[in-house]
Image (spheres, grey):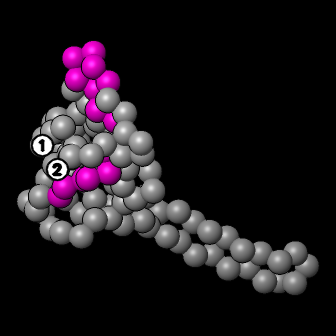
Amino acid sequence: MYAVIKTGGKQHRVSEGDLLTVEKLAGSKGDSVVFDDVLMVAKEGEIRVGKPVLEGAKVVGEIVAQVKGPKIYVFHMKKRKGFHKKTGHRQQLTRMRIKEISI
């Protein structure tokens, strides 16, 4: 059984027990998170697709850790002017384990 959920502006295909990394969600380690934006559920050959979401379907996950993504370097430069600037960014992420998929 698997489901397609929408979180953080992205769609993720998840199954029970999967470890998933998504955009930062509020909560701390051990907290439970419920995703109500379930776009599709497949169970034993039967596929149910929402328009756009399935009514009554939900996916429950548990937060494993709050982490940071890899460092992204941004470099700005203006030619012939002697101007350059280097900055960096690390995205805040939430790592979670999917506990339950219900229709």
Query: How many angstroms separate mark 2 from mark 1 (CA)?
Result: 5 Å
**Counting residues from the N terminus, which is met first, the one under dot 2 or under dot 1?**
2
Query: Is residue 63 shown in magenta?
Result: no
Q: Quadrant of the rendered structure where residue 42 is? A: top left
Residue occupied by mark 1:
99
Q: Is residue 37 magenta?
A: yes
Write the residue at 29% across / 32% down: 41
Name the spot of residue 85 as percent of width and height, x first: 67, 79
Above or below — where is 57 with respect to 64? above
Q: Is residue 33 above or below residue 50?
A: below
Location of residue 75 in the rendering, given as x and y in whole percent from the top left corner? 67, 70
Tell me the crowding category of disc 1: few under 14, some 14 to 19, or many 20 or more residues within 10 angstroms, Cα based: some
Magenta segment, which residues?
A: 33-47
The kind of residue on which mark 2 rests is: Gly
18 lies left or right of 8: left
Residue 68 is at least partly visible in this image: no
Which residue corresponds to the image point at 45% horizontal and 56% vertical from the top-left?
A: 9
User: Which residue in the protein does label 2 denote?
Assistant: 61
Q: Residues within 10 Å of mark 2 (few under 14, many from 20)?
A: many
Q: Please tell me whether mark 2 sits on a helix, a strand or a loop.
A: strand
- Disc 1 is placed on an element classified as strand
Evaluate whether residue 57 shows in this view. yes
- Residues at badges 2 and 1 in contact (C-beta under 8 Å)? yes
Looking at the image, residue 15 lies above or below residue 54: above
Image quadrant occupied by the N terminus: top left
